[in-house]
Image: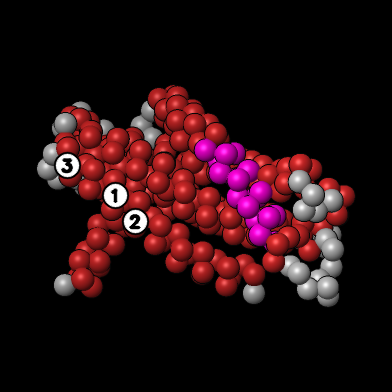
Amino acid sequence: MIIESSLTTFGQYCIFMCRVFTPPQKWRVFGRKLLQEIGKLGLDSIPLTIVISIFIGAFICIQMQLNMTSPMMPAYSTGLATRDILLLEFSSAVLCLILSGKVGSNIASEIGTMRVTEQIDALEIMGINSAQFLVLTKILAFMFFIPVLVVFSIATGLFGGWFIAAFTDMIPVSRYIYGIQTMFVEWYVWYTIIKALVFSVIITSVASYYGYYVKGGALDVGKASTNAVVASSILILLFDVILTKLLMQ
C-alpha cells in the first residue's frame, strides 16, 4: 500500500508539474506577480537567514576551537573548518531545511486556503491554468533569490565566527581570518549555489503540490502544510546525498 500510494503521489506530482511549466497567458501579469513573489519568498527570508547564520557560524567556531586540541593540528584549522562547513553543508542543505519550514508551509497554506475557499475552481472556470498561474512564479522567484540567501548565509556565518574571535580570547582574529583564506576552493561556492537551486525547486514545487490538492477544510490545510515540510525535508536530504556524490566526486 505504501509503494502504491507513493507511486500515485509521484505520478500526480509529475502531471502537476507539466501543467505548471507552461507559457504564461499574460506576460505583464506574470512579471508583476513574479516581483511580488520575490519580495514575499525571498526578501522576507533575509532576516531569518542572517540571524540563524550568525549563531551557527559562532557555534561552529566555538566547537572547532574547543575540540581541536591536538598539537598536530595547524593553528588556522578553526577558521578553515568554519568556512568549509558553511560552504559545503550549512549554507545550502541546512539553510534550505530551515527555509522549507518557513517558505514551504507558507506556500502550502496559501494555495491550500485558495483550494478550500474555491478560488482555484473560479480560476479554472475563467479558463486560466491555475497551476501555472499560482505556482510557476513561486518556483522562479525562489530560484532567482536563493543564491542571494546563500551568499548572505556564508557572509554572516563567517561574521559570527569572527565575532567570537574578536570578543573572546578563544582564538586570535588574525589566525581566524588566515584560516578562512587558507586553501580556498572556488568550486565550493558554486557547489553550494547549485545545491541550493535544486533545493529551492523542491521546496516550492512540493509545497505547491500539497496545497493544490488539499481536500476538506481548514484542518486539512494545516495537515497539508505539515506534510509539505516533511516531504520537502526528506527530499532535500536525499538530493543532498545524490548531488554531493555527483558534484564532489
Residue corresponding to mark 3: 219
Looking at the image, is 17 positioned above or below residue 24? below
Q: Which residues are magenta?
A: 48-64
Quadrant where the C terminus lies? bottom right
Kindly identify the amino acid type of the residue bearing the numbered disc 1.
Answer: Thr
> 114 or 223: nearer the eye?
223
Q: Earlier in the sequence, mark 3 or mark 1?
A: 3
Neighbours of disc 3 within 10 Å: few (<14), some (14-19), many (20+): few
Pointer 2 and pointer 1: residues touching (CB < 8 Å)? Answer: yes
Residue visible at 51% across and 69% down in the picture: 242
| Secondary structure category for the residue under label 3 | helix
Neighbours of disc 2 within 10 Å: few (<14), some (14-19), many (20+): some
* Image color mode: secondary structure
Kindly identify the amino acid type of the residue bearing the numbered disc 2.
Answer: Val
Q: Report x, y in % for residue 143.
A: 51, 44
In three-dimensional space, the C-alpha distance between marks 3 and 1, rounded to whole angstroms, equals: 11 Å
Q: Is residue 107 left or right of residue 11?
A: right
Residue 191 quadrant: bottom right
Residue corresponding to mark 1: 226
